[in-house]
Image (spheres, grey):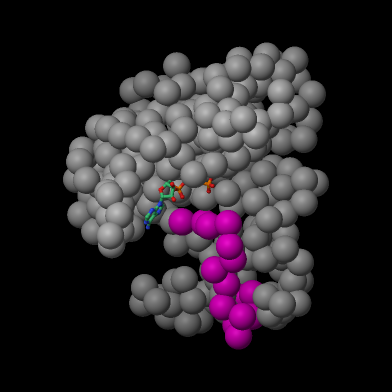
Amino acid sequence: MSPVAATAPLAVALDDVSISFAMKGQPVYKAVAPTSLHVREGEFVAIVGPTGCGKSTLLNATAGLLTPAGGKVTIFGEPLAGLNPQAGYLFQQDALMPWKSALDNVAIALEINGTRRADALAEAQNWLKKVGLSRFADRYPHQLSGGQRKRVGLAQVLVRHPKILLMDEPFGPLDAQTRQIMGTLLLNLWAQDRKAVMFVTHDLEEAIALSDRVVIMSAGPEARIIGNFPIDLARPRDTAEIRLDPGFHDLHRQIWDQLKSEVAKTYGEDMPS
Ligand SMILES: Nc1ncnc2c1ncn2[C@@H]1O[C@H](COP(=O)(O)OP(=O)(O)OP(=O)(O)O)[C@@H](O)[C@H]1O
């Protein structure tokens, strides 16, 4: 059981979802075999698995960026048709516009939905403050560090108040220390209104430090979810300090026991013993 109440409404229900890719002149690639994943309102779920297994693909199906070959995607009880309007998506790569300041990059997320510019700017300023960047509002992306650009990216997604947050290796390019700082910032912001989160990461420690539940995907092709580990560590958490908790080590050992055999399948004989 995840620490989130089993009675909380379902934000995302993937039921027997399978995903294939057709490429010219090649057999259809069955990336994801029928698999199911339910994420409740207020639940933070991390998805880990070997490289290329289909983690991003599953996130893309939830975002409505691709249509599954089979199964159902249901968002707050409604079948998903087209793009998921409830979801905010944060990718590994920055999605910032280089010709706009940090403030404008956040404000534009509201302006494209019809918010008046003055209101959008005020709200953007408010979010830059929440991510600790008030003093950098006028800077352009190339004048910001990697961690600062991630903060702008986070503000750009959260300013729209999505009910579901889809995060695909969002802190991947950052150094280990900045990743932990970003993790703690994310948890602090998340604690304010507890969105449903699906967080893809290669980093098992990061997955445990952040989430209520870690799910494991098997190696592809025909990957599916094969492990489900509730993370009952106390909140609020500091993502650096929680790693010193004995409970953290127990969870890491249990989950890695299952994950390592999937990782080994991906690397075959190249896997160091
Ligand atoms: N548009 C596409 N066309 C063809 N194959 C694709 C496409 N997108 C993904 N794939 C394949 O589907 C599989 C799953 O890809 P996906 O990006 O979801 O994996 P991942 O688990 O997120 O990988 P990583 O951890 O390396 O980011 C891979 O074998 C990939 O090559």
Using the rendered view, name the quadrant where residue 37 is placed: top left
Q: Would you say residue 100 sits in the magenta stretch?
A: yes
Most extreme residue toward the bottom, as rendered?
Answer: 99
Q: What residue do we see at 52% from left, 74% from top? A: 107
Q: Is residue 203 left or right of residue 85?
A: right
Q: Would you say residue 20 sits in the magenta stretch?
A: no
- Majority secondary structure in the magenta region: loop
Q: Nearer the viewer, residue 248 or 28?
A: 28
Across and down, in percent, residue 265 comes to: 53, 29
- Position of residue 235 relative to residue 133, above or below, is above
How many badges with numbers are in the image? Answer: 0
Using the rendered view, name the quadrant where residue 134 is placed: bottom right
Q: Is residue 222 left or right of residue 90?
A: left
Across and down, in percent, residue 35 comes to: 31, 31
Quadrant of the drawing holding the C terminus: top right
Residue 170 visible: yes
Q: What residue do we see at 24% from left, 59% from top? A: 82
Q: What residue do we see at 22% from left, 45% from top? A: 69
Across and down, in percent, residue 158 comes to: 51, 57
Q: What residue do we see at 73% from left, 35% from top? A: 238
Across and down, in percent, residue 166 comes to: 46, 49
Using the rendered view, name the quadrant where residue 97 is placed: bottom right
- Position of residue 148 relative to residue 19, above or below, is below
Quadrant of the drawing holding the N terminus: top left
Q: Nearer the viewer, residue 111 or 221?
A: 221
Residue 86 visible: no
Magenta residue span:
89-103
